Structures are given as C-alpha cells and as structure tokens.
Image (cartoon, rainbow, N blue to C red):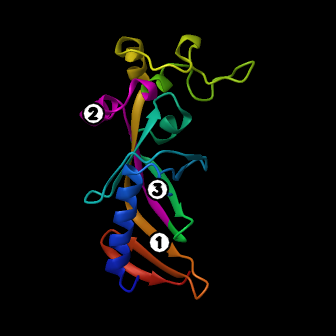
Amino acid sequence: MYETLEDIRADIDRRLVRAAKDRKSPMHTPVVATADADLRVMVLREFDAGKRLLRFHTDLRSPKARTIGEGAPVGVLLYDKGQKIQVRCRGEGRIEHDTPAVQAAWDAGTNFARRCYLGDGPGALSDMPTSGLPDWAEGIQPTDEQVMPARDNFAILLVEVRSFDWLYLAHTGHMRAQFDGEEGRWVAP
C-alpha cells in the first residue's frame, strides 16, 4: 500500500487536494498553529500541490492575522481517523488582504459565508453570548449590497509548506516519512 516515498508523497497530495474540495473529507478542517502557540480549527479552502500552498479564509482583524502578518512560521495538522493517517505540515504563512487571489476567493463565496466578516472582530468582548453579527444579519443570506462592508475584513492565510511529516498508525507497526522540499526519508514513528 505505502511501499515507497513516492507513494506517500502522492498520497499526501491526493489527501490535501480532496480535503480542500470535499467538505466530508476528514482532513477538511485541520488544526492550524501560529508561532505564539495558539491553535484553531480552520477550513482548508485550497491546496496547490505544485506550489505546496495551502489556502484558508480569515478575518483581517483576528489575532492570527496580526501574528502571521507578511510572514511567520505556521503549522497545520490534518488527521484521517478512518484511515489512521496524520499529516503535519510546517511552513511560512502570510496574510493577504488586497490581492487578486483574495478578491477571487471573496467572489467565489456566498453572501451567507461573507456575512461572517460583517460583525465584531474575532475576540471582541460581549456581555452575552454572541455570534458577533449585527442583529439584522442573524440567520439570513444578505444581499450583495449588505455584505459589501465585510470585504474590508476578509483576508486569506496562505501557507507555503516547507515540510510534511506523514504518519500511518497500524497495529502491525506504524510507518512514518518526512519530506523537506523534494527530499524524502523514512523515520522511526
């Protein structure tokens, strides 16, 4: 099944491409870690295997956007429980706000999703439980005009993956491989 490093590298690419396209993929919502040791679950929106580039959507006002800025270390952990495969990615993250890639991501979204960027910024204090959305936006799909102000808060997190760590958990014996750039190697689990 996983006999060569090439098999594993191809498996990683297949899994990440699927994770970005298929919301039912177990790797669709990985854990993303920033250099300040903060972790969060995010939706993987795209994986470009050729560039080894992961894309996520984020709020420009979020603490992670400030931490990452134009470049900072980022880790991404993906796990497929059914297949018992873990993929850890390490790379350089950057936040983009006013680029063609951000506009394309914005244009591809629905107004229901875009409304998430209308309300209070992530971490804003409240006296009661809140979605952070304005009252008028709760539970509706706003019009194009209504979500227009949200574009100012929308950004993308791009992670250029420098290394992959692949682990297969098996009762007969775990297998692990690491990839730095094009170079792969077997390592003890």
Q: Secondary structure at mark 3?
A: loop
Q: In front: mark 3 or mark 1?
A: 3
In the image, which residues are magenta?
Answer: 87-113
Left or right for 25, reference 13: right
Residue denoted by label 3:
25
Q: Position of residue 55 (x, y in %)?
A: 38, 46
Residue 65 place in picture, x, y as percent: 48, 36
Question: Residue 104, labelled with which disc?
Answer: 2
Q: Which residue is mark 1?
A: 166
The tag earlier along the polypeptide, 3 or 1, is 3
Label 1 secondary element: strand
Marks 3 and 2, how far apart in space? 23 Å
Left or right of residue 27: residue 172? right
Q: Between disc 1 and disc 2, whose residue precedes?
A: 2
Q: Is residue 179 above or below residue 130?
A: below
The quadrant of the image that shows the C terminus is bottom right
Question: Could you tell me the amino acid type at mark 3?
Answer: Ser
Q: Quadrant of residue 103?
A: top left
Q: Where is residue 90 shown, x and y percent of the image?
A: 45, 60
Q: Amino acid at mark 2?
A: Ala
- Look at the numbered discs 3 and 2 and tell me whether their residues touch, using CB distance below 8 Å: no
Q: Are marks 3 and 1 in contact (CB under 8 Å)?
A: no
Where residue 68 appears, x then y in whole percent? Answer: 47, 42
Residue depicted at 45% across the width and 78% down the height? 177
Label 2: element kind: helix
Could you say which disc has been placed on residue 146 in the image? none
Give the Cα distance between marks 3 and 1. 17 Å
